[in-house]
Image (tube, coloured by chain):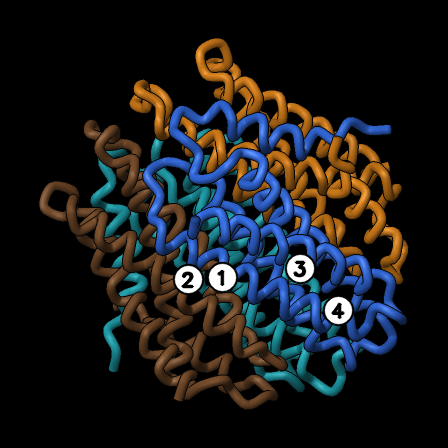
Chain colours: A cyan, B orange, C blue, D brown
Amino acid sequence: MPVPYVFVTVEAILRTHPRPLIADAAVLARCIDECSACAGTCTICADACLAEDDVRDMARCIRLCLDCADTCVAVGRVLSRQTDPDASSQLAALEACLAACRACATECERHAHHHEHCRLCAEECRRCERACDELLSALRG
Amino acid sequence: MPVPYVFVTVEAILRTHPRPLIADAAVLARCIDECSACAGTCTICADACLAEDDVRDMARCIRLCLDCADTCVAVGRVLSRQTDPDASSQLAALEACLAACRACATECERHAHHHEHCRLCAEECRRCERACDELLSALRG
Amino acid sequence: MPVPYVFVTVEAILRTHPRPLIADAAVLARCIDECSACAGTCTICADACLAEDDVRDMARCIRLCLDCADTCVAVGRVLSRQTDPDASSQLAALEACLAACRACATECERHAHHHEHCRLCAEECRRCERACDELLSALRG
Amino acid sequence: MPVPYVFVTVEAILRTHPRPLIADAAVLARCIDECSACAGTCTICADACLAEDDVRDMARCIRLCLDCADTCVAVGRVLSRQTDPDASSQLAALEACLAACRACATECERHAHHHEHCRLCAEECRRCERACDELLSALRG
C-alpha cells in the first residue's frame, strides 16, 4: 500500500515554518488537506457529470462543483500561508469555503443514489465543510 | 490607443448567456473585470516586492498580495457563472474578496510612497473592493 | 465610455518592476492581458454552454473551455513574474497555453454559428494564441 | 493513524467516470495526486522562505515555488478531466508541469541543507516530476 505522503507532507512542512502557525498544526493541516482533496474530487465530479447521459439534469451540480473546486484551491492557499496573516481575510475565506462545500454537498447528495461520483464528492465536501468549521472555531477561540 | 476589448468582451459575452444574469450586466461585469484586474496587479506587485532591496519589510505585503490574487481569481469565476447559482455561496465569496482586497490595499498603501507598484496595486485593490461592495448591495437588494 | 484601466494597469505596473522585464513591456503585457481575458471568456462560455438545450453536444466545448481557463490563469501568472525566471519553464508554459487556446478555439468555432458565446470565445482564444506565439518568438530571439 | 483518503478518493472517483480514462487509473491518479501535493508543498515553501532571515537570497526560490504551485494546480485539473480530451493540450500541459517541477526542485535543493522546508519541497517536486514523466511516457505509448 502506498505511504499516505500527501497528508504527512503538509503537516510536516507546516511544522518547519519559521513563524508560529495560526492554529494547532494538526487542525490546520487537516483543513488544508481537505481543501486540496475537495478541490480534486469536485473537479473530477464536474467532468464525470458532464459525460453522463442526464447531463441536462446535472447542470447545477457541475456548476457548484466548479465553484467549490475554485474556492477550495484559493482558501487552501490562504490558509497555507503563516507569514503575517490578516485575521479577517482568513475568517471570510473559511466562511466562503464552508458555504461552497455545503452547497455542493447538498446538490451532490441529490444525485448520490444514481451517480457514484456524486456520492463520493458529497462525502468529501462534507468532510471539508467540517474541517473548515473546526478551524473556524479554533481561530475564533 | 488600443481598444479596451477585455471590458467589452466580458460584458458582451455575459449578455449572450441563455439564463437571466444574477445582477445588472454592467454591475456584474464590472465586478468580474475588477477581480481579474486585481488578481493581475497583485501577482505583479508581489513579485516586484520580492525583487526590492527592502524585501524583509515587504513580507506581509507579498503575502497579502498573493492571498488577494488567489481570492480574486476564485471569486471572479464564481461570479462569472450564471447557471443555477447558490445565493449564500455568492455572498460569502464576495465577502471574502472584499476582505482580501481591503487587507491588501491597507498594506500596499503603507508602501505607496516608496514603491510605485504598491501605489498602483493599492489603487486597484480599492477599485475591486468597491466593485464587490456594489455587487453585494445589488444582490442583497 | 469607461477608461480601459485593466490594460493600462498591467503594462504600467510591469514598468515599475525593479528587475529588467523578460521581454518588451508591450508584448509581455499584451500576452498577460490576453491570458486574463481568455480565462474570463472561457469561464463564461463553459457556463453558458452548460445552460444550453443542446448541452449534450457541448461537453467537449465545456471541457476545453475549462482547460483553457485554468491554463491561461496559471500561465498569465508565470509570465507576470520577472524575478529570476527559469527560461525553460516559461517556454513550456507558453507552449501549453498556446495548445489549450488552439484546442478551445477550434472547438468553439464549430459552434460559433449557433451559440454567440462560442463565437466570442473562439475569437478571444485566437487572440490569446497569437499573443502567446508572439511572446514565444520574442523569447526565443 | 489517519486513513490516507485523499489518494483513495482520487483513484476511486476516477474509476466511477462514465468515459474510459486517458491512461491506467493508478498511473493517472498518481500524477493528479502528485500535482495536488506539489502545489500544496510549494505554496507553503514559498511562504516559509518569505519569513526567513535570508529572504533576499530566497527570491528565486519563492518565485519558482509560486510558478510550480500555479502550474501544478492547472495541470492537475486538465488531467482530471476525462471527457473528450485534446491530446496535444494534455502533452503540452504535462511538459509545462515537468519543467516547473524540475526548476523548482533544482533551486530548492540548493537551500535544502539550511531550510528544511526547501528539502521537503524539493523532494515533493522530484516526485511530481517523475509522476509527470511516467504519465507522459504512458500517453505517448
Q: Position of residue D53 (x, y in %)?
A: 20, 27
The reply to whether discs 3 and 2 touch (Cβ–Cβ < 8 Å) is no
SS at mark 2 in the image: helix
The reply to whether discs 4 and 1 touch (Cβ–Cβ < 8 Å) is no
SS at mark 4 in the image: helix
Query: Disc 3 residue type?
Result: Ala
Distance Cα–Cα, label 3 vs label 2 = 34 Å
Q: Are marks 1 and 3 on the same chain?
A: no
Q: Are marks 4 and 2 on the same chain?
A: no
In the rendered image, which quarter contains the C terminus of chain D?
Answer: bottom left
The nearer-to-camera label among 3 and 2 is 2
The reply to whether discs 1 and 2 touch (Cβ–Cβ < 8 Å) is yes
Of residues B4 and C50, the one drawn nearer to the viewer in this rendering: B4
Query: Disc 4 residue type?
Result: Cys
Packing grade of label 4 (10 A; few <14, some 14-19, many >=20) is many
Please tell me whether residue C114 is drawn above or below residue A12 in the rendered image: below
On residue C95, the disc is: 1
Tell me which residue sits at (74%, 75%) in the image: A58
Packing grade of label 3 (10 A; few <14, some 14-19, many >=20) is many
On residue A103, the disc is: 3
Of residues B61 and A4, the one drawn nearer to the viewer in this rendering: B61
Q: Which residue is mark 4?
A: C108
Distance Cα–Cα, label 3 vs label 4 = 30 Å
Tell me which residue sits at (69%, 59%) in the image: C126
Query: Disc 1 residue type?
Result: Glu
Q: Position of residue D18 (x, y in %)?
A: 60, 88
Q: Which residue is mark 2?
A: D96
Tell me which residue sits at (79%, 61%) in the image: B83
Q: Are marks 3 and 4 on the same chain?
A: no
Q: Chain of mark 2?
A: D
Distance Cα–Cα, label 4 vs label 2 = 24 Å
